[in-house]
Amino acid sequence: MHDLLRSLALFLIGDESTFVGNGKTCTTNPLTKLRRLSISNVGEKLEIPDAVKKQKCLRTLIVWNSPRTKMVEHELGRLGQLRVLDLNDAGLESLPDSVGNLLHLRYLDLDRTNIKKLPESIGRLQNLQTLNLSGCKSLHTLPKAITSLCKLRRLGLDGTPLSHLPRGIGKLGDLNDLRGFVVGDDGGEQDQGCDLEELQSLSQLRVLRIYRLERSRKGASALANICFLRMLSLTWVSPEAENNQPRCGQDAIQNANKICNDLSPPSSIENLQVYNFFGSGFPGWLMSSSLDASFPHLRSRRNHNDRTRAFWSPCLSNNCIS
């Protein structure tokens, strides 16, 4: 039955989808509207086939196996009906400003590309729901315009060395998956980063990864309104690791204790991960003898720091410590 259904689906979409690559060029039936295009082995510049640009009805564009592709032609913006643009693992270094003309775009995947900067025009993508930027090793800042993506639900930033997030991330009230909330900034001349209070308005979050918590000075109530949170990851970078100091100062340790104590997650939490915490002990909400009652859904707890491993002893059952 499965094979029959698959064959039927392929038959129904056959003339609406095509593949370009390995010597195959794009040919379309003028009586059929092409909806999905997959391209592989693209050269240095991604050029949209003329047949596709003429039809102006493409909904999905996937580029794969194209590590040499560094740029996309400006006429990408002519694909005004595009909903999905997947460029992950390409050698892409930039996007044209015309990407802001893709007003119907819902999904933009730039994972593991060489992108160095996003155009400010990205703020015009008012229907964008998913923006994947994980593993972009050359990307260090995001444009302020990203805070205008009012329908964004997923922002993936894991493994991307951002110095900070632009202030106003808290305006993205539909976010339910934020992997890479970077606290504060790198101490430049302008105070550009955002602190934990930006999280207070992101009440729909289910998945949250927070980085550079040692920069924060206030964490009270940051997670109080996030009632549906299931996965929480907390990461510090110790002063001794960043500045080659022999040990953490007392002020840094006390601040780490305070911030961790303030970040009490909601009872909905299922997965808790703590990285490089250098405080003197874990907070009361984690050490409580009634931990199972406070967090009935908690199934996975990870502590990635030998220094504080001993403080997990009251709640070792079901722990995964590494």
Image (spheres, rainbow, N blue to C red):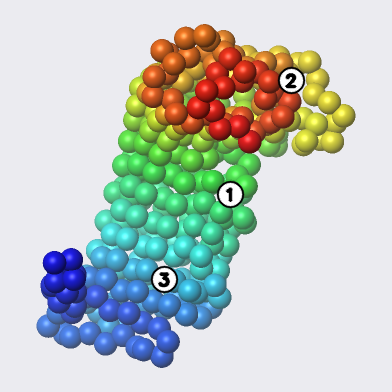
Q: Are marks 3 and 1 in contact (CB under 8 Å)?
A: no
Depth order, front residue of 56/206: 206
Name the quarter where the C terminus is drawn: top right
In this orientation, does residue 46 appear? yes
In-image side of 156 versus 302 (left or right): left
At 81% from the left and 20% from the top, the residue drawn is 249
Residue 22 found in image quarter:
bottom left
**Amino acid found under the numbered disc labelled 1:** Thr
Q: How crowded is mark 3: few (under 14 residues within 10 Å), some or many (20 or more)?
A: many
Residue 16 found in image quarter:
bottom left
**Amino acid found under the numbered disc labelled 3:** Val
The residue tagged 2 is 252
Depth order, front residue of 307/182: 307
Q: Which mark is residue 63?
A: 3
At 41% from the left and 50% from the top, the residue drawn is 131
**SS class, disc 3:** strand
The residue tagged 1 is 160
